[in-house]
Image (cartoon, helix red, strand yellow):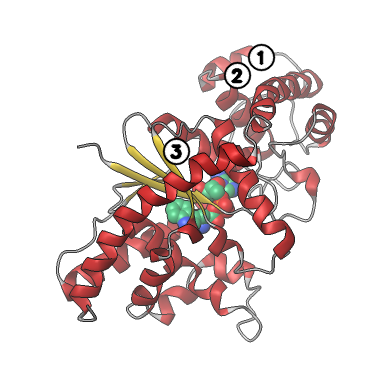
């Protein structure tokens, strides 16, 4: 039997090249080897205020992005989180074994809640418990994510181990899959911070749906480090970040990239990087337009049914174990 993958992204803001290189690219690469479940996590999205009128649209748009990136509905299950109510149900059970202290230590909660527990939403606080439920419902072996989700994965493993210890073997303990290169793509404007959907400065991110002009401008304006060499040097994070994007989009090795740009200046490098990104995104953006709502429905409905058949088995066993069924 194939091992199982679960991963997901939130239908908030716009997906950027960091989401693609840190996560989606690997989802596509792993889908042949694993039985894969890729979820659009709309329940996570509402942990921060969303415009109800656009949330549904963004949820469907994210499904289009999964498909355009190369997730094949013949091989992988694509579904919307809220279509499988077991996610919310398991969250309640796991909330009863999660500890305030461990949730308070989550850096994402500290960042997004801005350290203000008086005003931060309870949903933002329990966000990682919903994420653990997503993963554990499917008896997941592997979770491909970017670096920023590592702490949530550790919590998921802790909750699964605690439940198994207290109630008997129930959940598979999932392993994170964090790629060695590309797990933390940085902002083009502040290369000490990750590229982020919620960044107020849009120039920091290359969005997957940006047009060619915008991409070229953003790359031209990207901050660089002092010095002139174009190489992978940890003390020069801005150039390393741009070179990492080039490396992952071209499939070249690190040393091939360095040789390729040896003796060339920043201007040349940025022009070539912009062309590479634009050429990569062009066919992707064409594919996004291929899926109308009816085509999506024909993928998401059976996706949710398949997901639900597995999730409900896990939830039944959980309810039995805790003595409420
Ligand atoms: P989200 O929507 O913020 O991001 C989706 C994926 O993109 C990765 N990522 C990055 N990778 C590299 N560089 C970056 N700058 C960068 N920014 C984001 C994220 O690590 C993620 O893999 N909590 C999750 C969604 C989620 C989930 C799950 C993931 C909910 N349930 C269960 C895995 C399994 C999130 O907010 O991802």
Image check: 276 left or right of 67?
right
Q: Earlier in the sequence, mark 3 or mark 1?
A: 3
Image check: 238 left or right of 139?
right
Q: Which residue is mark 3?
A: 179
Image check: 252 left or right of 246?
left
Pointer 3 and pointer 2: residues touching (CB < 8 Å)?
Answer: no
| Neighbourhood count class around disc 3 (C-alpha, 10 Å): few under 14, some 14–19, many 20 upward | some
Q: Residue at x 57, y 36 (%)?
A: 295
User: Quick one: SS at disc 2?
Assistant: helix
Q: Which residue is mark 1?
A: 262
User: Quick one: SS at disc 3?
Assistant: loop
Classify 73 as above or below 45.
above
Image check: 252 left or right of 86?
right
- State whether label 2 is within 8 Å of ligand 1: no
Looking at the image, which is closer to me, 11 or 247? 11
Classify 41 as above or below 226.
below
Number of numbered callouts drawn = 3
Looking at the image, which is closer to me, 315 or 246? 315
The single residue placed furthest to the left in the displayed view is: 168
Picture coordinates of residue 89, whole percent (x, y): 39, 71
In this rendering, the label closer to the viewer, 3 or 1: 3
When asked about the image quadrant of residue 123, the answer is bottom right
Measure the alpha-carbon separation of dots 3 and 2.
Answer: 21 Å
Q: Residue 258 — which label?
A: 2
Picture coordinates of residue 251, whole percent (x, y): 53, 20
Picture coordinates of residue 37, whole percent (x, y): 40, 45
Picture coordinates of residue 253, whole percent (x, y): 50, 19
Q: Earlier in the sequence, mark 3 or mark 2?
A: 3
Q: Residue at x 72, y 36 (%)?
A: 209
């Amino acid at each position: 039997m194939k091992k199982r993958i679960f991963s997901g992204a939130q239908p908030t803001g716009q997906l950027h090249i960091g989401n693609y290189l840190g996560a989606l690219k690997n989802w596509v690469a792993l889908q042949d080897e694993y039985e894969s479940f890729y979820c659009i996590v709309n329940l996570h999205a509402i942990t921060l205020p969303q415009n109800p009128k656009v949330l549904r649209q963004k949820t469907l748009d994210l499904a289009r992005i999964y498909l355009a990136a190369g997730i094949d509905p013949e091989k992988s299950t694509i579904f919307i989180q809220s279509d499988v109510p077991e996610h919310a149900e398991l969250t309640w059970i796991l909330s009863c074994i999660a500890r305030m202290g461990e949730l308070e230590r989550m850096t994402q909660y500290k960042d997004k809640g801005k350290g203000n527990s008086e005003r931060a939403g309870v949903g933002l606080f329990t966000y990682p418990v919903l994420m653990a439920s997503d993963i554990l419902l499917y008896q997941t072996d592997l979770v491909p994510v970017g670096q920023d989700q590592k702490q949530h994965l550790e919590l998921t493993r802790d909750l699964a181990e605690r439940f198994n210890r207290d109630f008997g073997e129930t959940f598979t303990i999932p392993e994170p899959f964090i790629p060695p290169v590309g797990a933390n793509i940085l902002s083009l404007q502040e290369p000490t911070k990750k590229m982020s959907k919620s960044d107020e400065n849009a120039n920091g991110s290359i969005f997957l749906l940006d047009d060619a002009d915008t991409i070229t401008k953003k790359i031209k304006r990207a901050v660089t480090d002092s010095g002139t060499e174009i190489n992978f040097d940890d003390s020069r994070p801005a150039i390393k970040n741009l070179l990492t994007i080039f490396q992952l989009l071209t499939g070249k090795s690190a040393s091939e990239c360095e040789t390729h740009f040896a003796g060339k200046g920043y201007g040349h490098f940025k022009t070539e990087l912009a062309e590479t990104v634009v050429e990569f995104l062009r066919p992707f953006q064409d594919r996004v337009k291929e899926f109308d709502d009816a085509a999506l429905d024909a993928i998401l409905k059976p996706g949710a049914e398949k997901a639900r058949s597995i999730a409900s088995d896990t939830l039944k066993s959980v309810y039995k174990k805790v003595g409420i069924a």
